[in-house]
Amino acid sequence: MEKFKFNQQSKIDLSLDKEFSPIIMGNIAYETALGNTENPVLIRFAIERSEDQISMTECYVFNEAYQQQEANFIYIERLIKTILWIKGGYKIYFGGDQSLGQRIKASYQKGGLRDFDQDFMSKVYEKPFEVELVNLEEVPKTKETSKSIGRHLNGSRIGFDAGGSDRKVSAVVDGKAIFSEEVVWHPKEQNDPNYHYQGIMDSLKRAASKLKKVDAIGVSSAGIFINNRVAVASLFRKVPQNLFDNEVRELYFKIQKEFNNVPIEVINDGDVTALAGSMSLESNRVLGIAMGTSQAAGYVNGLGNITGWLNELSFVPADYNPNAPVDEWSNDYGVGVNYFSQDAVIKLAKAAHIKFDESLSPAKKLKYFQELAENNHDLALEIFKTIGVYLGYSIAYYAKFYDISHVLILGRVTSGIGGIKILEYANKILNESFSQLAKMISVNLPDEKSRRVGQSIAAASLPKF
């Protein structure tokens, strides 16, 4: 048997990314080839996260007689990476092929292939990351919970959305926004946490000035938050660790005191995206995807609850192409941030040889390409078509891990005609390549106002008082 290769191409020609090899198509090809062999090897792995929650997965790989060890490793490594970043965790239990397990264990050691991942998860859960090799029957079973949050519309509230390029705030009275504002800022470039604090306070005070009183504050922010504490957030990437530990982790408690200790709730912006979609659609099983400085995501399950998963799709693989762009933060190739963000737009603009001012900020570069698209610039439109193709294949992949009825796409990248093109080609991929799935999932693009400030309005509904 020939060595298996994952480089399955898109069914739509992508002139700006001819080597794009969707993860979902590579996996389908691998699993189809595996189905034509004898005695495939059962693998079980479980990932444990906070509050003793566990996610267990079963799959199969080629037995050693077929000499597909490298393909087995790529398949399992990408699968574990996917579930780790969707659900989060600090410990992997691996049962089955022990030599494969040893490679996975080596990958997640300090200095290993997935050094960034283990370090990140250690910081999130404040526990050492580990991989334990066990017998198949010793792999723990799935144990999941979810909780209700948001949808509180009473009183005078502030909703704040902290993005990487701009911060948005809304003053909301009994569920209606009476004031909304966006302010450009550059938090990822700042090493002084006082910059972040002053920026957040400025927006909150502007909204507070429009209200007779402030009953509650809801915050939607890029990053991971546990009980309103900042666990990890790209907004503070330049802040030294000692300042992060001393001033950033408890930042929102400091802000709460400035507002007379009114109820405050801080949630990942992806979960707020999903909540916004669930509220506007009056439906559950919503996956929200926000494309801006990075790729944020969140999920509301069939009960209308959030799951406590990380939903960090920015680090979930999208492309098997070994020459795919490498994320500068995680040092991994082919992950979501380079396919569903303003960086993706800039990358594709360079592939299209569109001339632009390199000195502009990423947000201004995005705006420039969007203006070209609005003027029917063919290559600019091709950028957003390409992102739509990426999205269609990735939705099919995400559906392996989420029970989805609706996908809601938001964020700066989806503004204007570009967002319409993204939606068009995402649906085209789903309809042409995954017709059964297309009947079960609707992909939604809110109106322009909701795309721009919808998260800050939904964020206002987070706290209960």
Image (cartoon, rainbow, N blue to C red):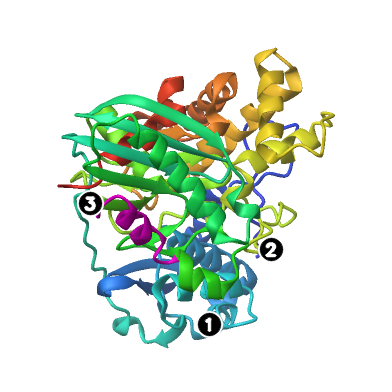
Q: Residue at x 25, y 52 (%)?
A: 260
Q: Please name the amino acid that badge 2 sits on.
A: Glu
Front residue of this view, candidates 451 and 57: 451
* Secondary structure of residue under mark 1: helix
Q: Which residues are magenta?
A: 249-263
Residue at 50% x, 59% y: name it. Answer: 233
Is residue 141 placed above or below 261 in the rendered structure? below
Numbered disc 2: secondary structure: loop
SS class, disc 3: loop
Alpha carbons under labels 1 and 2: distance apart: 27 Å
Residue 90 visible somewhere in the drawing: yes
- The residue tagged 1 is 105
Q: Amino acid at mark 1?
A: Lys
| Residue 410 coordinates in the image, percent (x, y) | 46, 33
Q: CA–CA distance between discs 3 and 2?
A: 61 Å
- Residue highlighted by disc 3: 263
Would you say residue 315 is visible in this rendering? no
Pair 3/1: label in front? 3
- The Cα–Cα distance between marks 3 and 1, rounded to whole angstroms, is 43 Å
Among numbered discs 1 and 2, the one appearing first in the sequence = 2
Of mark 3 and mark 1, the one earlier in the sequence is 1
State the residue in front, 277 or 149. 149
The quarter of the picture where the N terminus appears is bottom right
Kind of residue indicated by mark 3 = Pro
Who comes first in sequence, dot 3 or dot 2?
2
Indicate yes or no whether the magenta region holds residue 279. no
